[in-house]
Structure formats: C-alpha cells, structure tokens
Amino acid sequence: MREPASITTSLIAAFAGAIALTVVLAATGGTHRLGVDLVAYAALAAATGAWGRVPAIPLTSVMYWLFYAGFLVGRHGTVQWHGAIDGWRLAMIAAAGLGAAFVAWIWRLVSPAPVAGLRIPDSPAELFDPDLPAAPVPHRG
C-alpha cells in the first residue's frame, strides 16, 4: 500500500505546480477565461490531494487561490477579496483537493496488499517462458 507524500513534499510540489500552471494560463490568455482557469486550479488541487497528505490540503488550497486571484483575476499580482465569489472559488479548490484525498484514501483501503511470495522476474525472458528456472535467491545468515 502506497503511503501519501509528506506534508513538506506536498507543499513544495504544490508551489511548483502553482507557478507552472499560472505561467501557462497567463501566457495563453488566462485572464479572459477565468472559469476554465478555476477548473484547472481545481484539477491541480485534486492531483495534490490524491498524492499528498490531508493536513496539507488547506494550505495548498489557499496557495492555489492566491495564485489564481493574484495573477489571473488581479492580473498584476495584487490579491483582493471580491466578496462571496472568492469564497466560492476557494471552496471549489478546497473541495476538489479534499474529494480527491477521500477517493485516494478509499483506494488505498480496498487495494490488495502485495502478495508475500510474489517474485519479480530477473529478465524479460522469464515473462514469456515460465519453464525457465528461477534465479537462486541468496540467503543471508
């Protein structure tokens, strides 16, 4: 079962992802289609939520909203609160991250654990010819 990334790793990856997404969206005319851009930030929050730990989601959601509000809505790096609409934007980003974290948690619960005696083949030839003898496993003692 795969463990989620640490909080620090989640925050660093989220910051790098937010910078990259902001640059791409601003370069492609992101200030003219704010709804599409908000969905892009929600998708990034979902990816971060599925990959990282739950305590990092509020921090990454606020960070994504700050990048969205400051560089796409504000256009010049100025962040302003525009009332209820900004609350809905922040809630949408946070809900995407929390929803993806919940789905990832369920996935980790129901996914089968690795089989104890499962051996990874030493060469690709063993995948196609099961009669090949298995490589000896050295015993340490």
Image (cartoon, rainbow, N blue to C red):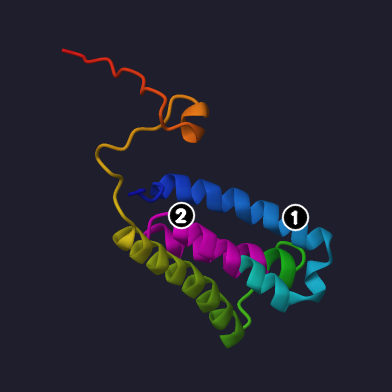
Sequence-earlier tag: 2 or 1: 1
Tell me the CA gap for discs 2 and 1: 22 Å
Locate residue 66: give its quadrant.
Answer: bottom right
Check the image and name the residue furthest to the front: 131
Judge whether residue 78 can be spotted in this image.
Answer: no
- The residue tagged 1 is 23
Quadrant hosting residue 29: bottom right
Q: Which residues are magenta?
A: 42-69
In the rendered image, residue 26, in percent from the top left (x then y), is placed at: 79, 61
Out of 65 and 129, give the one closest to the viewer: 129
Q: Is residue 23 magenta?
A: no
Please report the residue visible at 39 percent of the width from the left and 46 percent of the height from the top.
6
Classify mark 2: helix, strand or loop: helix
Residue corresponding to mark 2:
51
- Identified at 42% across, 32% down, the residue is 130
Q: Is residue 100 above or below residue 7?
A: below
Q: Are marks 2 and 1 in contact (CB under 8 Å)?
A: no
Residue 93 percent location from the top left of the image: 54, 72
